[in-house]
Image: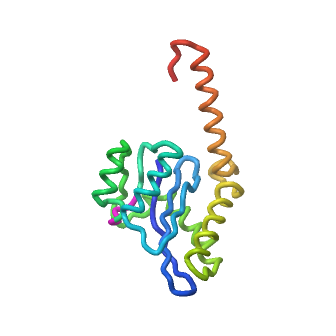
Amino acid sequence: VWAYDFVFDRCTDGQPIKCLTIVDEGSRECLAIDVAGSIRSRRVIEVLAGLVAARGAPRHMRSDNGPEFVAYAVQDWLREEKIETAYIEPGKPWQNGMNESFNGRLRDECLNAEWFANRAEAQVLIEEFRSRYNEHRPHSSLGYRTPNEVRSAWIAEAGQKQIKSEATPGLSL
């Protein structure tokens, strides 16, 4: 399950910042933070399509019922990719707890800690935060491993299963 949501802020020059955050609920990895002034459904699809091309499609996408997520274009694209939706109930952000938790960390550890002169600077500093979060920040819920360590372990385990499957004809995993 991937979860996605938005976080808003403002640069010191007054420019609005809208961040599309996408988190893998299993590994807690932040897959992307798209930073712009405005992000509509077409941009949501572009970001998701890039992630799906690079990583393969998740089984489900969890989100609130915001207009960018329930737009016909997004729903059509998800259907084409065979990705099921897992919309949360209105007014119940805890039903998207992984993404809400990540967004809280992004707010506390980056957005509230930095003064962005402009959107370009915000993009750079927010991407640095995403990298630290995935590569250097251990999570207690992951046995004090980083999201990247968990993902690497999953990939290694999947490779071992594939090797065993190929070595044992008739065995299906």
Q: Position of residue 107 (x, y in %)?
A: 57, 72
Q: Please, which residue is most extreme toward the top here?
A: 169
Q: Residue furthest left?
A: 72
Q: What kind of secondary structure does the magenta stretch mostly adopt?
A: loop
Question: In this rendering, is residue 52 above or below 11?
Answer: above
Occupied quadrant, residue 80: top left
153 or 36: nearer the viewer: 36
| Left or right for 39, reference 15 | left
Identify the residue at the far bottom of this view.
13
User: Does the magenta-highlighted stretch encompass residue 105?
Assistant: no
The span shown in magenta is 63-67
Q: Which quadrant of the figure has residue 156?
A: top right
Q: Residue at x 61, y 38 (%)?
A: 154
Q: Is residue 27 left or right of residue 56?
A: right
Q: Is residue 93 above or below residue 165?
A: below
Residue at left offset 48%, top offset 64%: 20
